[in-house]
Amino acid sequence: MPSRRTVLAATAGVTAALALGTPAHAAAVDDKKLRSLISRMTLEEKVGQLFVMRVYGHSATDPDQADIDANLSEIGVRTAAELIAKYRVGGIIYFTWAHNTRDPHQIADLSNGIQRASLTLPRGLPVLVTTDQEHGIVCRVGAPATLFPGAMAMGAGGSREDARTLGRISGAELRAIGINQDYSPDADVNINPANPVIGVRSFGADPDAVAAMVAAEVGGYRRSSVAATAKHFPGHGDTAVDSHYGFPVITHSRELWEKLDAVPFRAAVAAGIDAIMTAHIQFPALDDSGDPATLSHPILTGILRGELGYDGVVVTDSLGMEGVRTKYGDDRVPVLALKAGVDQLLNPPDLPVAWNAVLKAVQGGELTEARLDESILRILRLKARLKLFQQPYVSHHGVDRTVGTRAHLAAADRIAERTTTLLVNDGQLLPLSRAAHRRLLVVGADPASPSGTTGPPTGVLATAFSGLGFSATALSTGTAPSAATIAKAVAAARDADAVVVGTYNVTAGNAQKTLVEQLLATGKPVVAIAVRNPYDVAQLPTVRAYLASYSWTDVELRAAARVIAGQVGPRGRLPVPVQRADDPAQVLYPIGHGLSY
């Protein structure tokens, strides 16, 4: 950890230049001082401030050799410190796969190293350190940090206070490890069950309910001085194409957009959202040019800035995604995004190409330096509002005092219990009795942990049931079980008193369906848990007891086990409708459905 003297020396220049003259808790930002900072920046420094970039390694200065090699290959630098020195980037994004997030103390050291690398440069500025900590199925920082239920689970709980608590605790833990911006909450209204990229990342299908949860979570993050980011504007909830790999088209009318997609974003703006992330989607009713929203002046400047009155930071979704690369080359995308009204360019696939393209666009007159100054002022306002000029560093003591505390973990468990949704309970099969169903077999899908630190789901469930007085055995059968795997599970079921099976995005022809049907044929009681999309229940109408956990992280699975065992009652209510599998025009379970006992 840096000493206080080091901190003061590194920040003295920018802090003196900024001289906000406000107490640490105050939100007032002096634009005159910020403009003065901008006036002293070189053009190259200004271009750098617009980028938020990935970098490999657990350390800012001493990463593993494999990460050095990856950085050299993709960016042309060895380390995060070299990246900052060469390109003067205004932000860094952490990923698990980039080896940025091993454990809380390491993350704190990495964050401090990044801030130090930037602040010790001439005219050095603090860095926005960002990540995607949505909770649920998208989570970059894992245990021992506190992991909460994801958005759709929170939507099933329906508690604004719980959403505020999530934002407050998650924000406090992120801030303690030096992450000061979270790309969350997801403000998309998920009305398409086939949506491959949003789904349970959304709070639900009711725009007003989604808006309430978004606003509450934003409030929680603001309390912890972490910038929340509503995404993906103008709304990614009704697509059957994943914008990571294709170019989705939203066919909503302008009127439907106003009633549906716009509602949560308006609520986010009213709640004081710090940043809004764009979507790489085509939305002809809002802009018929064929450009993605990320590159659309009518959508970002006309609607978001003009009609919604938003003047905060606008950040692109990752520029490495196919949805934004379909129509234009990697050199044109960042320039067009800035012309559309974007402030921050996130994770371009080739930073040298993107950075130089913006520089040349200004030198050639396509972009003005004044246009860059507008975005940089918004970015510096955000950094000032987050108190990064005064408090750029974190400490190991702060990590130990904040991250994964007993109180935080207990709060996550309590919240999770309010989200588990009981969809079917024919013949009052649930709760299971320790007397009648003592020997449990737990089978099903074991998808990889979103954060790399929890699971596998069958093991978590078996351990939870054992702790509740059952004798539970885990058998992983996967998302596409073979005939031999199914036979093994059926044989094991014959020695059990009941079977608990986790299903994961079951479709009509999926072998998971065969597994469950053959388990049912044994005559043993079968309890199913949809560990991702709640729509699984429509594919398996003969299961007598079906629950939805909306994700497979430990906190949700443990809560589901407590519900199945009767330790707590089910309280969640569906935040999306579930249609019949054989007739999607018919609703099998409406929004608000959820059984109790």
Image (cartoon, helix red, strand yellow):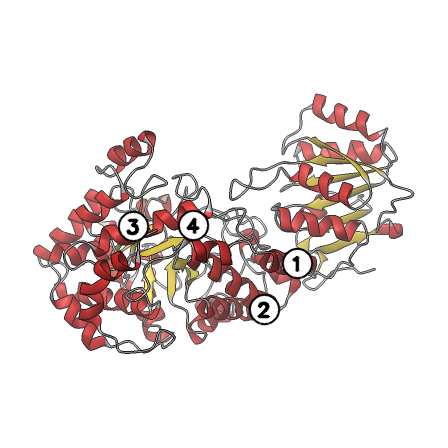
Determine the residue positioned at 14% across, 56% down: 122
* Dot 3 crowding, Cα within 10 Å, few <14, some 14–19, many 20+: many
| Amino acid type, label 3 | Ile
* Dot 2 crowding, Cα within 10 Å, few <14, some 14–19, many 20+: some
Give the x, y percent position of residue 231.
43, 59
| Residue farthest along the right direction in this orientation | 436
* Label number found at residue 248: 4
| Amino acid type, label 1 | Pro
* Label number found at residue 114: 3
Q: Quadrant of residue 326?
A: top left
Relative depth, front residue between 533 and 291: 533
Report the residue marked by disc 2: 209
Q: Is residue 252 left or right of residue 419?
A: left
Q: Secondary structure at mark 4?
A: loop
Q: CA distance from mark 1 to mark 2?
A: 14 Å
Q: CA distance from mark 2 to mark 3?
A: 38 Å
Label 4 or label 3, whichever comes before in sequence order: 3
Label 4 or label 2, whichever comes before in sequence order: 2
Relative depth, front residue between 248 and 333: 333
Q: CA distance from mark 4 to mark 2?
A: 25 Å
Give the x, y percent position of residue 34.
21, 71
Which quarter of the rendering shows the C terminus?
Answer: bottom right
* Dot 4 crowding, Cα within 10 Å, few <14, some 14–19, many 20+: many
Circles 1 and 3: CB atoms closer than 8 Å: no
* Dot 1 crowding, Cα within 10 Å, few <14, some 14–19, many 20+: many
Q: CA distance from mark 1 to mark 3?
A: 45 Å
Question: In the image, which is nearer the foreground, mark 4 or mark 2?
Answer: 2
| Amino acid type, label 2 | Ala
Report the residue marked by disc 1: 577
* Label number found at residue 295: none
Label 2 or label 3, whichever comes before in sequence order: 3
